[in-house]
Structures are given as C-alpha cells and as structure tokens.
Amino acid sequence: MAYGMDCSLNTSTSQPGPASIPDEKNTAQKASTLAGYLVAYKIAKSNKPYSKGEFVKDCMVSMGKILCPEKIKEFKSVSLSRKTVTTRIDAIAMNLSTQFRQRIENFKYFSVTMDESTDRSDTPQLLIFIRGFDDEFNITEELACL
C-alpha cells in the first residue's frame, strides 16, 4: 500500500555533455542545495518558524568548526535564510501536490471522505480524505485538504 508521497529529491543531471560531468564544485553545490532542502523539509514538518533555518545554520557551522574544520566552507555554503527556506518549502509542496494529482488521475476507483474535527481552541475544521486505487491495485490514501 502506498501511504504518503515520495519526498526524495532527484539530484541527477539528465543533460548529456559537459554539464553531466561531475566536478568537485558542482557536486559541492548539489550537496549544499540538498542539505538546504532537507533542513527546510524538517522545519516545515515540525511546524517551526521559517526563520529557524538561520539558527540551524549557525549551529551547523559551530559544530562543523569542532567536528570537521576542513569542511567548514561547505557548512557555510548552505543557504538557510527565511526567504530561501520559504521558497524551498513552496517547491516541496508543489512537488507533493503534483505527485498527488498524478496519482489521482490514474485511479480506477476512488472515494472521498469528509470529517469535522475541532482543534485545541474548539475551532471546527473540515478534513477531506481521498482514497483510491489504480489498475495495479496500488492503494493511495491522503489528506486532500484541511
């Protein structure tokens, strides 16, 4: 059963020619970008303020100075400003939304379930779940909207 979306980031280069030749600088940039996306994902998943990225970077640089001073440049190159974290979280959300839409298009049958729930402050919220399966009987169940 497929519960959840694929949150992995594809860092491979699909372009033929010189751009696909891995060099040290290109690899370091990809690693820095991937690290930034992973931190942004964890910030969003834990419902922390986007400004926490700068705090995390400060902690990473401090730890890097002690644990691996030869790699401190790589730690400093990870961009975790509030704007960058916001942009990356938006990109992750768009990617997950696209994956969800693609799965929905392939459903053979589906059902939609709605439920009302209240949070701690007694504010009612409408939850909408969609569950379906495709021709190969891969089941997908997701919270479509809150």
Image (cartoon, rainbow, N blue to C red):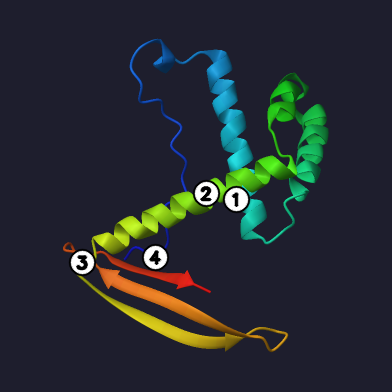
Q: Earlier in the sequence, mark 2 or mark 3?
A: 2
How far is mark 2 from mark 4, CA to CA? 17 Å
Give the structural element (helix, strand or loop) at label 4. loop
Q: Which mark is residue 41?
A: 1
In the rendering, which numbered label is found on residue 65? none
Q: Residue at x 31, y 56 (%)?
A: 102
Q: Amino acid at mark 2?
A: Ile
Number of other residues with Cα within 10 Å of mark 4, as a class: few under 14, some 14 to 19, many 20 or more: few
Q: How many numbered discs sit on the rendered protein?
A: 4
Q: Is residue 114 left or right of residue 123?
A: left
Percent position (x, y) of residue 81? 74, 40
Q: Secondary structure at mark 2?
A: helix
Identify the residue shown where x is 46% and y is 45%: 8
Sequence-wise first label, 1 or 3: 1
Residue 92: assigned label: 2
Q: According to the image, label 3 marks what residue?
A: 137
Task: Give, as a three-letter code, the residue at label 3.
Answer: Phe
Residue marked by disc 4: 3
| Secondary structure beneath label 1 | helix
Q: Earlier in the sequence, mark 4 or mark 1?
A: 4
